[in-house]
Image (cartoon, rainbow, N blue to C red):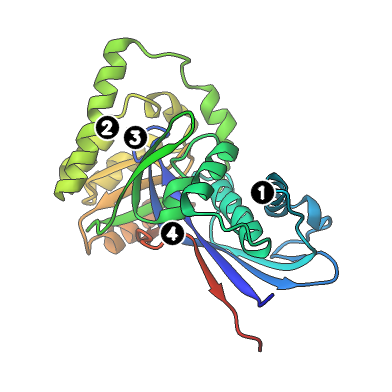
């Protein structure tokens, strides 16, 4: 087996009102270098005491097992720009890395649609899995057997993320949501989501940002869990952003802004919120990639 590297982008789920069905791939990355080995090794920035209990390895073994194969020992080296439990799809990226690891090493010949189904089964919904796998903006929904999706590329807007020090577990963010929605609320919330998609497709990013901020599915309930929620929305708008939303389940927030204005907005917001890690990011257009590595 020749050494290879798996690269998986971060993702921002929901994109405002596209609850559990819409996501953006972002150019923050998890990379996993893979080499043959006589025994398991896992190298990362922090110590890994039991390699075979690492989340990526467990997913890879599960994927291999589901196809009647067994994963051999490997030397793995992981690097990641994606912060954990911040609403930037760290778990989805790790799941995809694990599935692709098994796919490559065990010659499973999985298609992208196969990986999407398997990843969604593990993650529970496709809004992070799909964009990290395909790249761009992906609108998707799961049916009994299949996951239908539409990929949108070439969005001409800047993106700013506001990453706080604190973590927020997805389970906690889900627990504040209602079990059901009244029919009139669900209809209005769906209409808002439709308007976001339509405006993005037309390139009307100002209107998209306005509609993103009107979500009824999750943001009204999660706002209390997000540090500086109202302040970030207000200050970003004052500095020229089109709209600001919770990234995934949070606590990171995300603004869309006019093309070429993002860096100035990020710098101004960093002065207002010095305790945050504020940066501009771009939409990743490639999704998951696998690259053969040459021997040194």
CA neighbours of label 1 inside 10 A, class few (<14), some (14 to 19), many (20+): many
Q: Quadrant of residue 66?
A: top right
* CA–CA distance in space, label 4 to label 1: 20 Å
Q: Secondary structure at mark 2?
A: helix
Write the residue at 37% across / 51% down: 272
Which residue in the protein does label 3 denote? 18
CA neighbours of label 2 inside 10 A, class few (<14), some (14 to 19), many (20+): many
Dot placed on the residue nearer the N-terminal end, 4 or 3: 3
Q: Are marks 4 and 3 in contact (CB under 8 Å)?
A: no
Which residue in the protein does label 4 denote? 287
Left or right: residue 156 compared with residue 174: left
Q: Secondary structure at mark 1?
A: helix
Question: From what the image shows, is residue 113 above or below residue 76?
Answer: above
Which residue in the protein does label 1 denote? 63
Give the number of the mark in front: 3 or 1: 1
Q: Which residue is more in the foreground, 186 or 220?
A: 186
Which residue in the protein does label 2 denote? 193
Q: Secondary structure at mark 4?
A: loop
Give the number of the mark in front: 2 or 1: 1
Give percent across and percent down for residue 174.
52, 27
């Amino acid at each position: 087996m020749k050494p290879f590297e798996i690269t998986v982008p971060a993702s921002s789920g929901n994109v405002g009102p596209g609850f559990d069905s819409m996501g953006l791939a972002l150019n923050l990355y998890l990379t996993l270098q893979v080499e043959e080995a006589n025994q398991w090794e896992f190298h990362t920035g922090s110590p890994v005491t039991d390699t075979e209990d690492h989340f990526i390895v467990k997913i890879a073994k599960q994927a291999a097992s589901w196809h009647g194969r067994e994963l051999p020992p490997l030397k793995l080296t992981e690097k990641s720009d994606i912060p954990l439990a911040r609403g930037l799809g760290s778990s989805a990226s790790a799941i995809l890395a694990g599935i692709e690891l098994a796919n490559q090493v065990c010659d499973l010949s999985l298609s992208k649609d196969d990986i999407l189904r398997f990843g969604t089964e593990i993650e529970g919904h496709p809004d992070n899995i799909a964009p990290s796998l395909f790249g761009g903006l992906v609108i998707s929904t799961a049916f009994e057997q299949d996951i239908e999706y539409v990929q949108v590329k070439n969005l001409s807007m800047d993106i700013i993320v506001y990453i706080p020090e604190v973590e927020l577990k997805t389970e906690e963010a889900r627990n504040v949501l209602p079990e059901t929605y009244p029919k009139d609320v669900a209809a209005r919330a769906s209409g808002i989501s439709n308007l976001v998609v339509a405006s993005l497709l037309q390139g009307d990013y100002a209107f998209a940002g306005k509609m993103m901020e009107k979500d009824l599915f999750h943001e009204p309930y999660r706002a209390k869990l997000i540090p500086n929620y109202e302040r970030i929305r207000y200050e970003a708008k004052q500095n020229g952003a089109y709209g600001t939303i919770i990234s995934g389940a949070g606590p990171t927030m995300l603004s869309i802004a006019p093309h070429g204005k993002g860096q100035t907005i990020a710098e101004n917001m960093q002065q207002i919120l010095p305790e945050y890690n504020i940066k501009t990011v771009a939409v990743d257009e490639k999704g998951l990639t696998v690259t053969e590595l040459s021997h040194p």
